[in-house]
Image (cartoon, helix red, strand yellow):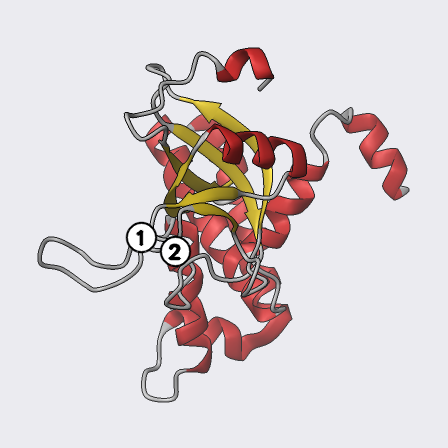
């Protein structure tokens, strides 16, 4: 976004515009805060999310005290120009309560959990199964079987999705692909590798040709 673009933003009567902060890798909505024009410019110049504090009547850089900064990748305006979307790489929790995001108060009945993307929620469940001593589950049996069992299931499921892609319906392809992703996540948790680590690798490959990327790895 350039200075010329800033003139198209619609700040409210107090000179502020709401900014929604989203993890650029996972899609998790981390927080919402306000920016004035100076905060928008500081964010773009420094690539660290900078907001306007209405209570303190000054600019504040997210993480200036806690160290939980937001490294900004891109900033977008919505179709009306009155709301910003800040795509970032968060460091540590983004909520002052110590939670990863600020959205953990459901307004309807249901399980109390933060509003996290499905893959992160699934990772939490897998980690619970990994350390559970009170429940014997299929997931726990995979962890107990170690790399050999997990690898065997991954190869089996990969073959099934390959055959589905060749011969079966789109619904079957989606179902078999879900099995592959589930067993892959189990394998990642077994090695204490997060799905975010995988997404970071993929993000780093944008703009790099497939042949060039493979050549750089020597494979």
Is there a contact, CB below 8 Å, between mark 1 and mark 2?
Answer: yes
Residue for point 60% across, 43% down:
48
Residue 111 position within the rendered picture, expressed as x and y whole percent measured from the top left: 18, 63
Of 93 and 176, nearer the camera is 93
Residue 19 position within the rendered picture, expressed as x and y whole percent measured from the top left: 40, 36
- Label 2 sits on a secondary structure element that is loop
Whether residue 35 is visible: yes
Q: Which residue lies furthest to the bottom in this view?
A: 133
Position of residue 202 in the picture relative to residue 106 (left or right): right
Specify few, some or many for label 2: CA neighbours under 10 Å numbering under 14, 14-19, or 20 or more: many
Residue 126 position within the rendered picture, expressed as x and y whole percent measured from the top left: 43, 67
Residue for point 52% across, 29% down:
75
Of 144 and 14, nearer the camera is 14
Q: Residue furthest left?
A: 109
The answer to which image quadrant residue 71 occupies is: top right
- Please report whichever mark, 1 or 2, sits nearer to the chain's N-terminal start: 2
Whether residue 219 is visible: no
Residue for point 59% across, 35% down:
42
The answer to which image quadrant residue 72 occupies is: top right
Of 109 and 193, nearer the camera is 109
Badge 2 is on which residue? 101
- Above or below for 162 versus 148: above
Badge 1 is on which residue? 115
Specify few, some or many for label 1: CA neighbours under 10 Å numbering under 14, 14-19, or 20 or more: some
How far is disc 1 from disc 2 in space, using C-alphas? 8 Å
- Label 1 sits on a secondary structure element that is loop
């Amino acid at each position: 976004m350039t200075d010329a673009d800033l003139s198209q933003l619609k700040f409210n009567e107090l000179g502020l515009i709401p900014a929604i902060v989203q993890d650029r890798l996972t899609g998790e909505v981390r927080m919402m805060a306000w920016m004035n024009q100076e905060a928008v410019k500081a964010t773009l110049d420094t690539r660290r999310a900078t907001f306007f504090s209405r209570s303190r009547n000054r600019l504040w850089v997210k993480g200036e005290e806690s160290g939980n900064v937001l490294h900004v990748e891109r900033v977008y305006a919505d179709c009306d120009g009155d709301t910003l979307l800040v795509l970032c790489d968060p460091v540590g929790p983004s909520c002052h309560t110590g939670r990863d995001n600020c959205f953990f108060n459901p307004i309807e009945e249901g399980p109390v959990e933060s509003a996290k993307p499905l893959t992160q929620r699934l990772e939490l469940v897998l980690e619970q199964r990994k350390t559970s001593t009170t429940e014997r589950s299929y997931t726990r049996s995979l962890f107990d079987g170690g790399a050999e069992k997990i690898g065997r299931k991954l190869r089996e499921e990969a073959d099934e999705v390959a055959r589905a892609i060749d011969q079966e319906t789109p619904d079957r392809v989606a179902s078999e692909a879900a099995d592959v992703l589930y067993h892959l996540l189990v394998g990642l948790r077994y090695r204490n590798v997060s799905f975010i680590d995988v997404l970071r690798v993929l993000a780093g490959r944008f703009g790099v040709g497939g042949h060039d990327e493979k050549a750089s790895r020597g494979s």
